[in-house]
Image (cartoon, rainbow, N blue to C red):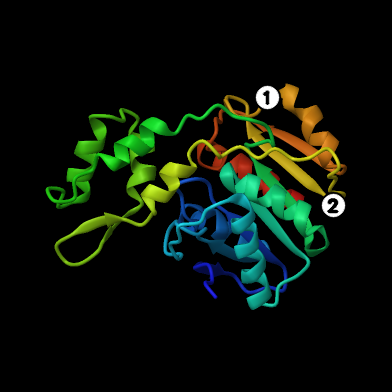
């Protein structure tokens, strides 16, 4: 059995699993995990399949990612736990809540709702595919190549966290780029009308985000019957990075 790679922070019988977004990894959440652990939790920063240090496979879907997390918690004897999911990780968290509601205490969905989104990752994936590791010999080389296609330095820095040394002379990417490229038009989660989750749920989203707006609240309320919604000021899609202090305060208050 393939088990997801994780970094575990804190020592508590209150377990929380954080699920990163598309092209990300658990490590993106390390500074937040430290703070959450300090408030009395054991935080599991997982890498989803085909991401980070987890296994690669030709199969990739929301159902499989949910099953991977189920196998992870079974292996670690975890039940009655908390979950935070950002973006694609929020979709995984909502689907986990649908499939295994009895295992969850509370969930936090970060800047995503279960609706159809227009595909918009093409240019990022094309940019990553254009990286020529025969001539790239440093992070700066990779950044220089990416900057011709992606002007936003913050997006580049996020993507470049995926760089690693395959051997002492060759850089590569931790993500399974070909498989994720094929998934780029399947990133939306549509929930069926017969689903409802009754445990405490927080939707936390950026006031400047393109992903969530107030017209989506009704949809979320139809599925999540014990829902709190917080709009984060001065934040877009990467809520936790745009306004970390506000985000952490609201997150820890909700968890406790």
Give the camera-side residue of 72 and 12: 72
Q: Position of residue 56 (x, y in %)?
A: 43, 62
Among numbered discs 2 and 1, the one appearing first in the sequence: 2
- Residue 43 vs residue 151: left or right? right
Q: Position of residue 255 (x, y in %)?
A: 74, 54
Tell me the residue at 55%/61% (across/down).
Answer: 34
Specify whether residue 82 is in view. yes
Q: Residue furthest top?
A: 215
- 12 over 162 or under it: above or below: below
Identify the secondary structure beneath mark 2: loop
Q: Quadrant of residue 16?
A: bottom right
Tell me the residue at 33%/39% (across/down).
Answer: 156
Quadrant of the snapshot with the N terminus: bottom right
Task: Write down the residue under mark 2.
Answer: 199
Q: Position of residue 253 (x, y in %)?
A: 74, 50
Task: Write down the residue under mark 1.
Answer: 213
Q: Quadrant of residue 145?
A: top left
Q: Residue furthest left?
A: 135
- 116 over 104 or under it: above or below: above
Q: CA distance from mark 2 to mark 1?
A: 23 Å
Identify the secondary structure beneath mark 1: loop
- Residue 47 vs residue 82: left or right? left
Quadrant of the snapshot with the C terminus: bottom right
Tell me the residue at 56%/68% (across/down).
Answer: 9
Q: Position of residue 190 (x, y in %)?
A: 70, 37
Tell me the residue at 31%/30% (across/down).
Answer: 150
Crowd class of label 1 (few under 14; some 14 to 19; many from 20; radius 10 Å) = some
């Amino acid at each position: 059995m393939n088990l997801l790679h994780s970094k575990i922070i804190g020592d508590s019988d209150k377990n929380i699993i954080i699920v990163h977004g598309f092209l990300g990894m658990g490590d993106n959440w390390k500074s937040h995990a430290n703070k959450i652990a300090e408030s009395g939790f054991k935080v599991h920063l997982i890498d989803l399949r085909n991401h980070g240090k987890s296994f690669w496979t030709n199969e990739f879907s929301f159902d499989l990612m949910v099953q991977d997390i189920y196998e992870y918690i079974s292996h670690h004897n975890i039940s009655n736990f908390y979950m935070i999911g950002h973006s694609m990780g929020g979709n995984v968290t909502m689907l986990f809540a649908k499939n295994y509601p009895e295992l969850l205490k509370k969930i936090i969905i970060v800047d995503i709702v279960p609706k159809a989104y227009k595909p918009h990752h093409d240019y990022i994936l094309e940019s990553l595919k254009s990286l020529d590791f025969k001539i790239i010999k440093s992070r700066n080389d990779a950044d220089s190549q990416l900057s011709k296609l992606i002007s936003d330095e913050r997006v580049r820095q996020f993507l470049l966290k995926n760089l690693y040394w395959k051997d002492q002379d060759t850089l590569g990417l931790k993500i399974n780029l070909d498989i994720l490229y094929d998934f780029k038009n399947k990133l939306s989660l549509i929930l069926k009308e017969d689903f409802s989750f009754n445990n405490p749920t927080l939707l936390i989203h950026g006031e400047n985000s393109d992903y969530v707006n107030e017209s989506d609240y009704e949809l979320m309320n139809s599925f999540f019957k014990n829902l709190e919604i917080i709009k984060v000021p001065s934040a877009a899609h990467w809520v936790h990075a745009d306004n970390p202090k506000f985000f952490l305060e609201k997150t820890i208050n909700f968890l406790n």
